[in-house]
Structures are given as structure tokens and as C-alpha cells.
Amino acid sequence: MKILLRCLWCGDEFKKPRYEYNKALRRGHFSFYCCKPHSQAHHAIKNARRCEHCDTPMPKKAANRFCGRECITASRNHPEKPCTMCGLFFRPKSSRTVYCSRPCADKAHSIRMLGTGNSHYKDGTSYSKWFKETRPLIFERDKDACVVCSTPFQPITYERNGAPAQKSNLIVHHIDEDPANNRVENLLLLCASCHLVHHKSAVTPYPWFAEYTRQASESMTSKWKATATSLLTAYSSTTA
């Protein structure tokens, strides 16, 4: 004779001989399963160590106190404090956390790297600053357009540190591919497509770049040339 039972793991009904059922009760077993794998699966969870924060079973993790990183963080009851960048109060993940988010951390790092905070700072001169000050001269000389296909300048709006910002659709390209060499003869304007064609080609289809920049720079006004010469003198040490 068989008795109808319900599996404690999957919930399905199954039949078990009455003598086996009675034997299990006499041994103090009150949980029944339709098959051995379901019995093993349930016992693995039932006897597993539980997370100290959320009480979730952790099979095969007897040495762990928490089930994951979120519970580890939540278990640390650090008091709220203000973000040193934006002033917003937040609950830090550790006692050393000083920023409420990655954007705030990135913004603070950018500020620290300006001027004397940068390990590469040398008397206020650097090739990146030289490039930044020379860039407007290149746009003026090349008439705000790609020197290959004449694509005109167009501002592109994007988001930076949570605020709208703008950048150019044109790229100031280094002919010798040395970012430290920011002489006007080494720089020219390219659109993204022409810039990609140049770099992806085994041999550049634009071998006339150097001759173009030399002639274009020579044809500029004396004021433009004086500005370019002044920048070269100020930043000549950065090419050493």
C-alpha cells in the first residue's frame, strides 16, 4: 500500500510505500522528496551557512560571512558625510571614501592635476598647454574646414561631468604623430573620416600635408606669425 506525499523541494505529488513512510517517521524524518537529487538540493541549502546581513543561504561557502559585495557594504554602518566635491551627504562604502560618485571623483582628480598639482608640471609650460594655445591658430589658418575634403566646422554637443559641453567635429592632426611637436608646420585640420583614412592606410594618401602646412603658414598675416613664433619660444623646452 502506498501513501500520497508532496515533495518539499519541487512541490510535486508522489507516492511512497507506507512501510517506508512509517519507518522514516520512527527515525524522526518528517521531510519527504520525490527523488534523491531533490533531497540533496534541499539539504544543501537547508544546512548551508547563511549570510549575516540578509540571511540568504550560501551553499558551498561555509567560510564566507556574507553572500556578496552589496551585503558586505551594507553591513558596515558608516555614518553619512558630505561629498568633498559637491557637498551632497551620502553613506560611504568605507571610512576612506570621500566622494559620493565616480563623476565627483573624476572631477576632483581633474582639478588636482591642473598646474603644480601635475607631476609633469614645469614652470607652467607643457606640450599639452602649447597644443591648446596653438589650436586656435590652426583653425584660423585652415579656415575652419578639413584640408582634404573641406568639411566645415560644426560644434558637437555632449555631456561632461553631468553638464552640457561642446567639441569640434574637426581634429587637429600631428603630421609626424608626435604630440609634443606643436609647431604650426606640424599641425592641420582633418575631419574624422579623412583622419581615419590617413591612419588606416599603410601609406598615407596625403603625402602633401607637410608642404601644405609650410605654404599655408607662410601666407598668413604677420600678426599670426608673431603669435606662432611667440608660442614656439615659450614652449621650446617641452620638445627637448
Image: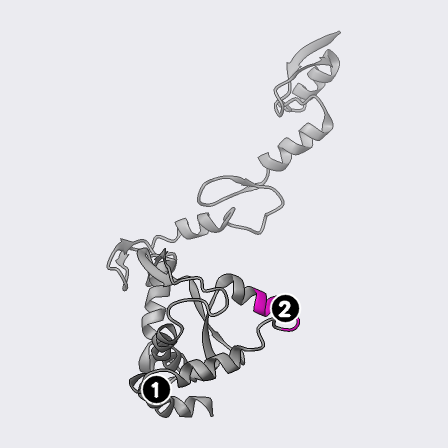
Quarter of the view holding residue 11 = top right
Q: Please give the range of residues in magenta.
A: 197-203
**Placement of the N terminus among the 4 image quadrants:** top right
* Foreground tag (1 vs 2): 1
Position of residue 83 measured from the top left corner of the image (x, y, whole percent)? 28, 60
Mark drawn on residue 225:
1
Quarter of the view holding residue 169 = bottom left
Mark drawn on residue 87:
none
Element assignment for label 1: helix
- Between residues 32 and 121, which one lies in front from this camera angle? 121
Q: Does the magenta stretch include residue 132?
A: no
Position of residue 174 measured from the top left corner of the image (x, y, whole percent)? 49, 77
Viewer can see residue 179: no
The residue indicated by pointer 2 is 201
Position of residue 47 measured from the top left corner of the image (x, y, whole percent)? 59, 37
Sequence order check, earlier mark of 1 and 2 = 2
Q: Which residue lies furthest to the left in this view?
A: 87
Which residue is pictured at 67% across the width and 24% down the height? 27
